[in-house]
């Protein structure tokens, strides 16, 4: 059963991390809806932490693999040439943009996890509100900024917005893509910058539990979760970048509203708490 749970959660993580629908919200919802929390907790041996690390490791591998050449050029230029090249500038923009989210995570992450993470109505509100904002901003904003036209100011603003992703249901990719669209990024550029910006955040989430990763290196459960989220994540990155070349974010906004409504209905029908 645990292997099946790891497989399903790997799919959920791979989809939710790169589509603007909130991976953390969907992982919580999935575990709650199917009653998997008790199964995972009863397994003991830090299985819950190991599975969480595996899922983040998988999506980290996905984004690193897909953008390997991009990151290689960005890092080489940024480290050797500073801000004298477009790639060098972008590397340091991404470094600076990562800081607000990292600081917010260190300062508020534990509190958010303890107080809000399991609150289903908070998740529903986050999904719904962000869905409306995403739709409105995407509909009203121009598409004039391409990837190599991104400025330091714009990158910093997107980085600051990333802190809001700590609230369950908001979505890291959702808030960064929405902010990018508000700043006039074309849709494909908004997605690409969001994915690149996700790399250090996902890496931190996975690597902060390095001992757990090492201890579970031979655990099939760990690798089922990691491989599944990596493969699904690769597909979703490719899908989003291609989809947004000729489509808007409306379908994701509608999905968020529908999912929020379903959570509220099930919550009150079942008397969940």
Image (spheres, grey):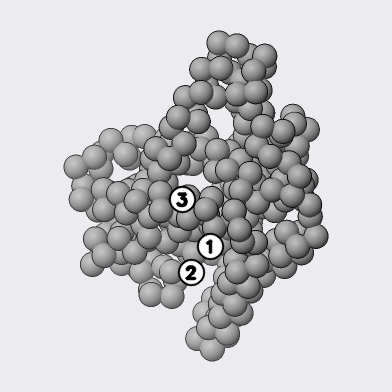
Comparing marks 2 and 3, which lies closer to the viewer?
3
* Image quadrant containing the C terminus: bottom right
Give the residue at mark 2.
Answer: 29
Tag 3 residue: 238
Q: Nearer the viewer, mark 3 or mark 1?
A: 3
Q: Residues within 10 Å of mark 1 (few under 14, many from 20)?
A: many
Farthest front residue in view: 246
Q: x, y percentage for residue 256? A: 60, 69
* Vertical placement of residue 252 versus 108, above or below: below
Whole-number angstrom distance, CA of label 2 to CA of label 3: 25 Å
Mark 1, secondary structure of its residue? helix
The residue closer to the viewer here, 81 or 145, is 145
Outermost residue toward the bottom?
269
Q: Which residue is more in the foreground, 158 or 169?
A: 158
Q: Position of residue 94 (x, y in %)?
A: 62, 31
- Classify mark 3: helix, strand or loop: helix
Pointer 2 with pointer 1, Cβ within 8 A: yes
Query: Does 50 appear above or below 167?
Result: above
Report the Cα–Cα distance between label 2 and label 1: 6 Å
Residue at image position (61%, 58%) is 246
Residue at image location 49% in from the left, 41% down from the top? 202
Q: Which is nearer the N-term, disc 3 or disc 1?
A: 1
Which residue, given by chain and number where applicable, does mark 1 sit on?
Answer: 25
Residue 203 seen anywhere in this rendered image of the structure: no
Give the x, y percent position of residue 119: 58, 67
Give the quadrant of the N terminus.
Answer: bottom left
Residue visible at 41% across and 68% down in the picture: 31
């Amino acid at each position: 059963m645990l292997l099946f749970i790891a497989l399903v959660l790997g799919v959920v993580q791979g989809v939710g991390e790169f589509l603007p629908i909130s991976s953390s919200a969907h992982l919580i919802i999935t575990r709650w809806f199917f009653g998997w929390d008790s199964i995972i907790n009863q397994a003991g041996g830090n299985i819950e932490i190991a599975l969480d690390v595996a899922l983040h490791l998988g999506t980290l591998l996905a984004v690193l693999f897909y953008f390997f050449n991009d990151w290689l050029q960005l890092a080489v230029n940024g480290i050797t040439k500073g801000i004298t090249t477009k790639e060098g500038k972008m590397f340091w923009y991404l470094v600076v943009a990562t800081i607000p989210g990292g600081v917010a995570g260190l300062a508020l992450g534990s509190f958010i996890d303890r107080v809000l993470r399991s609150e289903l109505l908070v998740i529903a509100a986050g999904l719904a509100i962000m869905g409306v904002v995403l739709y409105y901003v995407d509909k009203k904003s121009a598409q004039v900024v391409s990837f190599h036209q991104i400025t330091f100011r714009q990158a910093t603003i997107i980085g600051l917005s990333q802190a809001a992703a700590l609230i369950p249901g908001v979505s890291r990719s959702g808030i960064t893509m929405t902010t990018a669209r508000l700043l006039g990024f074309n849709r494909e550029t908004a997605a690409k910058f969001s994915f690149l910006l996700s790399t250090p955040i996902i890496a931190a989430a996975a690597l902060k539990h390095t001992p757990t990763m090492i201890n579970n290196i031979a655990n099939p459960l760990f690798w089922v979760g990691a491989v599944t989220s990596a493969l699904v994540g690769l597909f979703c990155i490719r899908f989003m970048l291609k989809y947004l070349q000729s489509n808007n974010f409306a379908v994701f906004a509608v999905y968020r509203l529908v999912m929020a409504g379903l959570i509220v209905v099930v919550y009150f029908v079942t008397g969940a708490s």
